[in-house]
C-alpha cells in the first residue's frame, strides 16, 4: 500500500455543486494531516490543517478518520476559482518528524 | 508569505553541464527539502536537510547532490544534467514538530536540452 494515496481525478463539477475527495494513508502512527492547494504552474500552498474532531473553514470542511486511515475534503458551493489540484499531506510520527509525505494530488475542474 | 526564494526561476541548460539551484530562507526553519514535480508523478523528494551540514537522500536522489553550509541556504546541484532532469523543482522549509506545515518556494523550471 502506498504511503499516501489520492484519486488523481479530474473531478469535473458544475459551479455551485458540492464535491468531496478522500486521501488514504498507510502509517497508523501518523500525527498530522493537511490539505494543500496547487494552482497550475504555481507552488503548493496550505489550504487547511485537518484536526481529529474535523474542522471547517468557510466552504471547506476537513475530516479525519483514524480507524479507516483516511482524510477527506468537502467543498460546498464550489466556485470557478476552486479549480486547482488538491494535495493531501501527512506528517510522520514524532520520532521521525523530518520527512513529510505528499499525495500526488486530485485535480478539480469547476465548470461554469 | 513565508520568506523563501528560489533562484533561478527559469533555466535552460545543455546536457552534460553542471547546474546549481539555490533555495534561500529568512525564516530560520530547521528543515529544508528539494522536490521535483513531473506530470503523473506528483512531488518527489530528492534530498532534504535536517540541519546545517546534515542532509539525507530522498526517493529520487541519483544524479543530484546538495549542500547546506548555513541555515538559510540549501543548494541543489545536478552534477551532469540529463534530459530526464527537465522538471519543475520546488524547495520547501519547515520547522521540527509533528504538526508543523511546510512552506514552498515559487519553483524553478529547468529545461535540459
Image (cartoon, coloured by chain):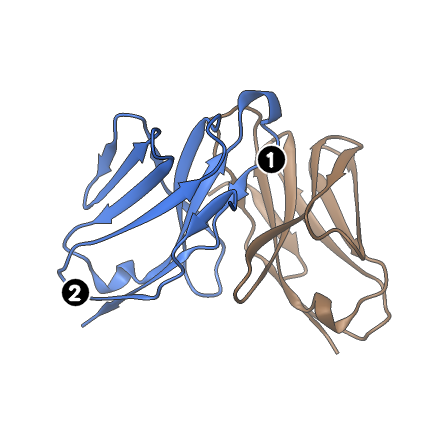
Chain colours: A blue, B brown
Residue at x-position 46% and y-position 43%: B1
Question: Image height check: is B103 above or below A106?
Answer: above
Q: Position of residue B23 (x, y in %)?
A: 67, 47
Q: Position of residue A37 (x, y in %)?
A: 39, 51
Real-space Cα separation, disc 2 to disc 1, in angstroms: 37 Å
Name the residue furthest bottom. Answer: B113
Question: Image height check: is A55 above or below B20?
Answer: above
Residue at the disc numbered 2: A15
Indicate the quadrant where residue A109 lies.
bottom left
Residue at the disc numbered 1: A99
Indicate the quadrant where residue B96 lies.
top right
Indicate the quadrant where residue B11 lies.
bottom right
Q: Secondary structure at mark 1?
A: loop
Q: Secondary structure at mark 2?
A: loop
The answer to whether the residue labelled 2 contacts the one labelled 1, judged by CB atoms less than 8 Å apart, is no
Q: Which of the pair B89/A21 is nearer the observer? A: A21
Q: Which of the pair A52/B34 is nearer the observer? A: A52
Q: Is residue B102 visible?
A: yes
Amino acid at each position: 500500500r502506498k504511503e499516501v494515496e489520492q484519486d488523481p481525478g479530474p473531478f469535473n463539477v458544475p459551479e455551485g455543486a458540492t464535491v468531496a475527495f478522500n486521501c488514504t494513508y498507510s502509517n497508523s502512527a501518523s500525527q498530522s494531516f493537511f490539505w494543500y492547494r496547487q494552482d497550475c504552474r504555481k507552488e503548493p500552498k496550505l489550504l487547511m490543517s485537518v484536526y481529529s474532531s474535523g474542522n471547517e473553514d468557510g466552504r471547506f470542511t476537513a475530516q479525519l478518520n483514524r480507524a479507516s486511515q483516511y482524510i477527506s475534503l468537502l467543498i460546498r458551493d464550489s466556485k470557478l476559482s476552486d479549480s486547482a489540484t488538491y494535495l493531501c499531506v501527512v506528517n510522520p510520527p514524532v520520532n521521525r518528524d523530518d520527512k513529510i509525505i505528499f499525495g500526488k494530488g486530485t485535480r478539480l475542474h469547476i465548470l461554469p | 508569505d513565508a520568506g523563501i526564494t528560489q533562484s533561478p526561476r527559469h533555466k535552460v541548460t545543455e546536457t552534460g553541464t553542471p547546474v546549481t539551484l539555490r533555495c534561500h530562507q529568512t525564516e530560520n526553519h530547521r528543515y529544508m527539502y528539494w522536490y521535483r514535480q513531473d506530470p503523473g508523478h506528483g512531488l518527489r523528494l530528492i534530498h532534504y536537510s535536517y540541519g546545517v551540514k546534515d542532509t539525507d537522500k530522498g526517493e529520487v536522489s541519483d544524479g543530484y547532490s546538495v549542500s547546506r553550509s548555513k541555515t538559510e541556504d540549501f543548494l541543489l546541484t545536478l552534477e551532469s544534467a540529463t534530459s530526464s532532469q527537465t522538471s519543475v523543482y520546488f524547495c520547501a522549509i519547515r520547522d521540527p514538530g509533528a504538526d508543523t506545515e511546510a512552506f514552498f518556494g515559487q519553483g524553478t523550471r529547468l529545461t535540459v536540452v
